[in-house]
Amino acid sequence: MPELFSDRSKCFGCEACSACCPSGAIKMVADAEGFAYPVIDAALCTECGRCVDVCPAGKGVSPCEQHFFAVRTLSEDVLYKSTSGGAFSLIADAILKIGGIVCGAVYDEDFNVVHVVSEDIAPMRKPKYVQSSLGGCYDQLSTAVKDGRPVLFTGTPCQCDAVRSYFGDDSSIYYAALVCRGVGSPALWKDYVKFLEKNGPLTSYCSRDKRRADDAHTVAYIVGGSEMTVQYLSDPFSRIYAKELSLRPSCYQCPYATIDKTFDFVIGDFWGVEKAFPELADGRGTSLVITGSARSYQMILSMKESAVILETDREHVKQPALEIPAKAGMLRRFLMKDIAAKGPDGICDIAAILKKYGS
Ligand SMILES: Cc1cc2nc3c(=O)[nH]c(=O)nc-3n(C[C@H](O)[C@H](O)[C@H](O)COP(=O)(O)OP(=O)(O)OC[C@H]3O[C@@H](n4cnc5c(N)ncnc54)[C@H](O)[C@@H]3O)c2cc1C
Ligand code: SF4
Ligand code: SF4
Ligand code: SF4
């Protein structure tokens, strides 16, 4: 049997191994934290070794020629609906215009976070601070590639690397990796949704709403027809994420916590915009875009009619997520123990958890 990892905490849960297995021998199984890991059925495995070859964990990153930009869409509507400056939508629109298709993260009807392949990019906007499942996307992406369609894949850097490893150097796929501090526990999120739904069905959830022009630091959701808004760090669920307590184990040793990433695009929030470009520091959001290929550099430059595109220097790009992985403190272990302890209703004592860790 192949050894997929000697250290399970390095597994990203990217699902590339299970997607590539020709025998269907690998199933992704969620642990008590809600994070999925591959499990191999020895009876089905033919020891072909494909799963080990495709796995991006431990392969590292290499530097490339980069350009750094502050980006803001000129569309007021898209800017409002985006987290920072709408870089994702600008890049996605450029791919759709040439007949392509986009793969990104959405909430499904039960508020699970999943990647989908679609021309409808609206539900992909805004971050979901929970690990997204790539599930069936590998097959859908294969179909798009076979049909000769350009594809934009957006996701965490480990997901981008997994998809790139799966497809090899297929030039029809463009990669836009997020600046990423980590993905939160799907188990905590699931129980939190059930907790919110005690007041009626949850019909909308936005972790980075912009109505207060506060750089999207408002959480807004609709439960039982009533809308709630709360400042990001006063929201216990968001606070637990921001305190880096609920992240996947691999995030605490993330190999992508460096500015040197070889993707077409790296997109994030332009922290420190008030120093680099004070004219954009109005709380409405500006994207940081790092291009890492000649084609992505050209694509960004060609957007000048639909966006503010300001090239800048590497020293203006400062973010913990581009320097050092998150730190797992003792509290994480206690939190995960509390999440694993389910009551008779099958959910953890979420009210107590939110109070204990989210204040
Ligand atoms: C888990 C997570 C952590 C992040 N951490 C940082 C950070 O530390 N610093 C920083 O500058 N930016 C971070 N970002 C990125 C930031 O929130 C914005 O997405 C980014 O600034 C792009 O803004 P936009 O206006 O172009 O994107 P939007 O229009 O808001 O697009 C959001 C994009 O994120 C993708 N996405 C959303 N949720 C997920 C998910 N769970 N998994 C994978 N992809 C997802 C969507 O597919 C879409 O491509 C993080 C995003 C996520 C999802
Ligand atoms: S070695 Fe081959 S058959 Fe066995 S689990 Fe890996 S990919 Fe599947
Ligand atoms: S990192 Fe991805 S490919 Fe590697 S073992 Fe984990 S899920 Fe499989
Ligand atoms: S922090 Fe690193 S390991 Fe965690 S989701 Fe982001 S890229 Fe993947």
Image (tube, grey):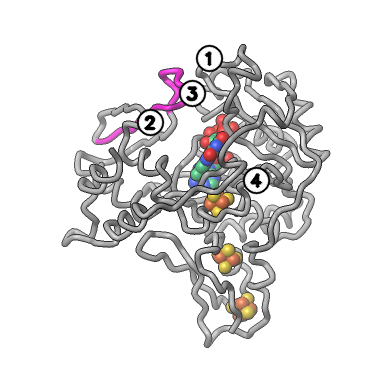
Kind of residue at badge 3 = Asp
As drawn, the residue found furthest toward the front would be 330
Which residue shows up at 72% across the image and 60% down it?
167
Q: Determine whether the residue tagged by mark 3 lies in a helix, strand or loop.
A: loop
> Residue 46: horizontal and vertical position, in percent?
63, 85
The disc, 3 or 1, on the residue closer to the chain's N-terminal end is 3
Which residue shows up at 31% across the image and 33% down it?
222
Crowding near the residue tagged with mark 4, few <14, some 14–19, many ≥20 C-alpha atoms within 10 Å: some
Residue assigned mark 1 = 282
The disc, 4 or 3, on the residue closer to the chain's N-terminal end is 3
Q: How many marks?
A: 4
Residue assigned mark 4 = 258
Segment tinted magenta in the rendering = 209-223
Q: Is residue 178 above or below residue 164?
A: above
Cα distance in 3D space between marks 4 and 3 = 24 Å
The disc, 4 or 1, on the residue closer to the chain's N-terminal end is 4
Residue assigned mark 3 = 215
Residue assigned mark 2 = 232
Cα distance in 3D space between marks 2 and 1 = 18 Å
Kind of residue at badge 2 = Tyr
> Residue 155: horizontal and vertical position, in percent?
58, 46
Picture quadrant where residue 141 is located? bottom right
Picture quadrant where residue 89 is located? top right
> Residue 51: horizontal and vertical position, in percent?
63, 72
